[in-house]
Amino acid sequence: MNNATEESTIIEIPPILKGKKVLISGVANKRSIAWGIAQAMHQAGAEIIFSYQNERLKGEVEKTLAGTIENATLVELDVSNDDSLDAAFETVATEFGGQLDVMLHCLAFAPRETLQGGYVDTLRDHYSIAQDISSYSLAAMARKARPLMQKAGGGSIISLSYLGAEKVIKNYNMMGIAKAALEAGVRYLAADLGLDNIRVNAISAGPVKTLAGRGISDFTTMLKHHAETAPLKRNVSLEEIGGTATFLASSMSNGITGEVLHVDSGYSIMG
Ligand SMILES: NC(=O)c1ccc[n+]([C@@H]2O[C@H](COP(=O)([O-])OP(=O)(O)OC[C@H]3O[C@@H](n4cnc5c(N)ncnc54)[C@H](O)[C@@H]3O)[C@@H](O)[C@H]2O)c1
């Protein structure tokens, strides 16, 4: 908390998710935002199923969980594939007795070429891939989660976004367009699912050095600039993002839906 890039650590998390059934997507390794959220939700008493993108990543997820969250169910889910979505949610339904309280959409992808240079050069195929995986997947997963959350009497869906949805951020390019669609999707899904008492929100997180983050050209400069400019004069920690996600998953946030909450040391307020 003292120098410009140091992150703060927290946080006493109360057992506000005790007995809640949670699906968390997007753990790739210990640096993943999804892993920060998983640890916080685990501390809060949640029962968690983890989804992993493909067989190649499964081992890394198992390694990440080892020693912290033992015996969790793992399920393969590639959001670009409808069969994979069907199979994954069937497993979730079976494992969780047909119910689901919380779903974490913590994934995104854009071809590397789109994260450098200018948006003007984005190819049609690259645009489609980025939108499909980073934005459409939230609707696809929400549609699958809906009956399980209806059975649970309601639910909370949380996605991850970034300031590049609202403002032009150097090199973020295509991902900014996809995140803008994602944030609009959060609002439309919140309107669709509100009658079922299903809330849909996003956290707009400050930059974190993850696998996905490092795909953005000049990411280290971005981190440094963020820490120097933000009111709190530092970057955010995985624990802080995890704490906010836990709040959004819990009944403490029951009046909030369709919202994009910035967890960014205040960076987004600066002119
Ligand atoms: N790192 C940052 O600075 C930052 C800031 C704000 C928001 N975010 C967002 O946070 C989320 C998590 O990213 P992260 O930074 O923790 O990186 P990460 O690399 O740890 O996680 C990205 C995850 O996306 C998954 N994924 C990609 N394509 C997929 C597919 N087809 N099917 C299923 N899963 C797929 C990967 O397997 C991986 O687990 C993303 O939505 C990202 O845009 C990141």
Image (cartoon, rainbow, N blue to C red):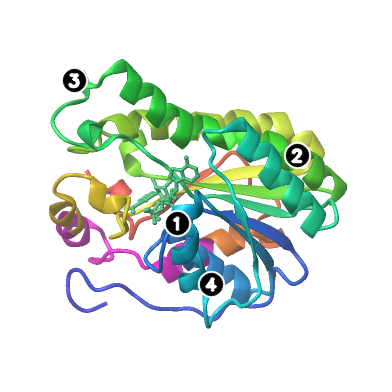
- Count the numbered circles shown: 4
Q: Which residue is mark 4?
A: 39
Residue beneath disc 3: 121
In the depicted view, which residue is nearer to us: 10 or 23? 23
Query: On the image, numbered disc 1 is attached to which residue?
Result: 57
Quick one: SS at disc 1? helix
The quadrant holding residue 126 is: top left
Q: Does the beta carbon of the residue at mark 1 sit less than 8 Å from ligand 1? A: yes
Q: Residues within 10 Å of mark 3 (few under 14, many from 20)?
A: few
In the structure shown, which secondary structural element does the residue marked by tag 4 occupy? helix
Percent from the top left, x then y, of residue 25? 55, 53
Task: Give the distance between the C-alpha atoms of the residues marked 3 and 2, in whole angstroms.
Answer: 38 Å
Disc 3: residue Cβ within 8 A of ligand 1's nearest atom: no
Q: Is residue 166 visible?
A: no
Residue type indicated by callout 2: Arg
Q: Which labelled disc corresponds to residue 146?
A: 2
Which of discs 1 and 4 lies nearer the camera? The answer is 1
Lower position in the chain sequence, tag 4 or tag 2:
4
The amino acid type found where label 1 is placed reads: Leu
Q: Alpha-carbon neighbours of circle 2 within 10 Å: few (<14), some, or many (≥20)?
A: many
Per the rendered image, the range of residues in magenta is 224-244
Distance, label 2 to label 1, CA atoms, is 27 Å
| Vertical placement of residue 96 versus 257, above or below | below
Tell which circle, 1 or 3, labels the residue nearer the N-terminal end: 1
